[in-house]
């Protein structure tokens, strides 16, 4: 499943910007609702605790990792083109 229609509609730069905006809005909304805080999770972990802050962080991290792999397996994203893996 490729998003060629979005690239055709807005151009490559526009599609990237729009995708970033949509992901940012979704992430921002979920961060506010879950009270996600990486710093608080690290402090909680360093004190030897496994509480709600660390649990939310692990949920977010695993969701991102699994979503990325699912998109790669579906062929929607080519991770070989990633700047971070190059």
Image (cartoon, rainbow, N blue to C red):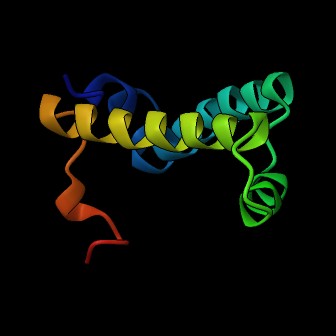
Q: Quadrant of residue 70?
A: top left
Q: Position of residue 76 (x, y in %)?
A: 22, 33
Q: Position of residue 28 (x, y in %)?
A: 77, 34
Q: How many marks?
A: 0
Pick whichever, 41 or 74, lies toward us.
41
Q: Position of residue 73 (x, y in %)?
A: 14, 35
**Horizontal placement of 13 versus 56: left or right?**
left
Task: Please tell me which residue is depicted at 26% across the width and 33% down the height of the picture.
Answer: 71
**Horizontal placement of 52 versus 2: left or right?**
right
Q: Residue furthest front?
A: 48
Task: Please tell me which residue is depicted at 25% across the width and 42% down the height of the picture.
Answer: 77
Pick whichever, 12 or 80, lies toward us.
80
Compared to residue 58, the image places residue 42 above or below, namely below
Q: Position of residue 3 (x, y in %)?
A: 30, 27
Compared to residue 78, the image places residue 28 above or below, namely above
Task: Please tell me which residue is depicted at 48% across the width and 45% down the height of the picture.
Answer: 16
Q: Quadrant of residue 65?
A: top left
Pick whichever, 55 or 74, lies toward us.
55
**Horizontal placement of 15 versus 45: left or right?**
left
Q: Quadrant of the C terminus?
A: bottom left
Q: Quadrant of the N terminus?
A: top left
Task: Please tell me which residue is depicted at 52% across the width and 44% down the height of the picture.
Answer: 61
Q: Quadrant of residue 29?
A: top right
């Amino acid at each position: 499943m490729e998003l060629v229609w979005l690239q055709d509609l807005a151009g490559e730069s526009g599609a990237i910007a729009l995708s970033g905006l949509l992901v940012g809005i979704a992430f921002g909304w979920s961060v506010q609702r879950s009270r996600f805080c990486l710093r608080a999770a690290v402090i909680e972990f360093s004190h030897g605790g496994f509480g709600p802050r660390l649990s939310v962080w692990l949920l977010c991290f695993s969701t991102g990792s699994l979503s990325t792999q699912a998109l790669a397996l579906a062929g929607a994203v080519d991770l070989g083109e990633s700047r971070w893996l190059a």
